[in-house]
Image (cartoon, rainbow, N blue to C red):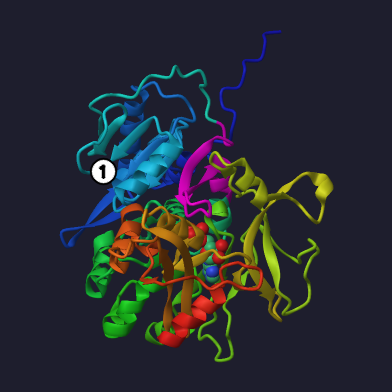
Amino acid sequence: MPATPAPEVTHRPDERFDEFLLAAAATHPGHPAVVEYADGAERVTTFRGLRETAERYAAQLDRFGLEIGDRVMIVSDTSAEAVALVLACASRGLPFVPVSPETPAERRATIERLAEPALCLTADGRPEGAVGHGRFGGGTIEVPQPPVRRGGSRRVVTPTDTAYIIFTSGTTGRPKGVVMSHRAVVAFYRGMIAEGFVSVGDRVASTSPLQFDFSLLDIGMALGSGAAVAPVPRALLRWPTRFLKVLRVTRATHVNGVPSIWRQSLRHIPDQLADLPDLRGVLFCGEEFPLAELRHLQRLRPGIRLINCYGATESMAASFAEVPDPLPDDVTHLSIGNGHEGTDILLLDAEGASVREEGVVGEMYLRSPALMTGYWGDADATDAVLVIDPLEPRSGQRLLRTGDLAFRGADGALRFCGRRDSQVQIRGNRVEPAEVQRRLLAHSDVCEAAVVVAEGPGREAELCAFVVLADGADGTAESDLRAFCLRAMPAYMAPGVVRIVDSLPVNQHGKTDHRRLLAQLLADA
Ligand code: ADP
């Protein structure tokens, strides 16, 4: 009997990030996949066009002889070209590391140092550095000096290979790289798409930078449903009339983003928001939508579908809960529902036992096939959050310990109610105050620093830093310290308020008393 030939395909064709997202290129090749806003008009890239560009990029990546697992850093906003490039990288097993063009050079350099990419490609601007730096666009990759060939001993990309690494704020003072496999992202996409928010022909406006996994959620939701993703140019997002114009021109049916993207339009041009012709759904994520603003949006757009998406980069997201329309007056916490299909959100107490009673606060743990592989180069941090299932330790299965607190309502659904640690969300962006504190301490004139978050009803969360200067450093002003932060971190991470003080108050354990600092701030406000 002839020997059975070894199977060439070791995974189902749609278990890879790129294959999953380009499946509609076979079924709906002429449908829009990306709708961009360019000079006041829409520019459409079809699924066929997107696949062709991705294939062109992939063929060019092949020239460099990279090894499966070699990282490609992509400095870009979301665009048809950038989507094609991430698909190309994924098809070759090259994890992509998205970085926003607005990222300060120092932070970009830090991410580059940590990720050690084989290739760094920018959408515009001159390629920096010599070896392995280049530019992409128009289906072409220009690399003045190609990366050093590594040999390429592996040939087959498997679903457990890394699809991407996203760097987020870390307590140790350096960004933390969340490593996601193809299998995990596709498992997440499947669970999300099963919720049935969008379908063929819809257009999903994406407002998050490519650097945040929320943009990959948008891309997955759109392309995975045979719909189009419509990136809103970052520079226009701040201007409510321009933002709404982009939505009108690109005929967005759904808009995804952090809650704060709606604030200016609700405040200044509610009539224009009410008049948007195609808008049917809004998905928000990253933090709780201020309830007064949410009710205002519902009044302006009766019947609009509002989805509260809860989750973290470590699993892209975990649940999608529909906001009741209208939101009853007695609601104080929005429901985050329960896990999306395939994901179980467990509510556990400090001993690791299930919390079942209504209204009792516990910590959320995720049991899911959509979890990160780990933090890049940080086994200790990984072990701290990917923990053996406390309910069935014998299984050896790891759950994601989210650090997020919640309680159950009478309907059995969860309500988010804060963090176990000091991580905060500033305008929907995740920040570890400890990272900001470390940056301040890196200033040669600073000898002590503490960072607190001031928030309250009607006040947007804001980082406030208290700083004690070293002897003889009186020349340093508060604005210098803020500028020092801005050089190394995105604007949302730099403290809005910096106060130079003679000393920091301490509590009875001798630790900086954050509560007193906060009280001091609120008293002065
Ligand atoms: P993202 O997946 O949006 O990139 P991040 O990793 O930046 O999320 O931040 C995750 C954290 O944001 C969560 O651990 C939680 O504390 C908070 N968060 C996310 N979504 C929500 C939500 N819908 N409501 C309240 N808080 C949220």
Quadrant where the C terminus sits is bottom left
Q: Is residue 217 left or right of residue 59?
A: right
Residue 198 visible in image: no
Query: Label 1 neighbourhood size at 10 Å, few (<14), some (14-19), many (20+)?
Result: many
Q: Nearer the viewer, residue 489 or 516?
A: 516
**Magenta region, residue range:** 158-187
Rendered image quadrant of residue 275: bottom left
User: Residue 199, image x and y in percent?
Assistant: 45, 60
User: Is residue 189 in sight in this rendering?
Assistant: yes
State yes or no: Cβ of the residue under disc 1 lies below 8 Å from any atom of ligand 1: no
The residue at 69%/66% (across/down) is: 363
Q: Does residue 427 lie above or below 49 as drawn?
A: below
Residue 177 lies in the magenta stretch: yes
Q: Amino acid at mark 1?
A: Ala
Image quarter of the N terminus = top right
Q: Which residue is mark 1?
A: 123
Along the viewing direction, whichever of 449 and 117 lies nearer the viewer: 449
Image point 53% across, 85% down: which residue?
327
Residue farthest along the left direction in this orientation? 39
Residue at 84%, 46% in the rendered image = 394
Quarter of the rendering containing residue 249: bottom left
Q: Nearer the viewer, residue 469 or 440?
A: 469
- Image location (x, y in percent) of residue 460: 42, 77
Q: Is residue 65 above or below residue 493?
A: above
316 is within the stretch colored magenta = no
User: Residue 473: percent from the left, percent from the top?
Assistant: 33, 61
The residue positioned farthest toward the bottom in the image shown: 329
As rendered, which of 194 and 144 lies closer to the eye?
Answer: 144
Instruction: Answer left or right for 520 relative to 265.
Output: right
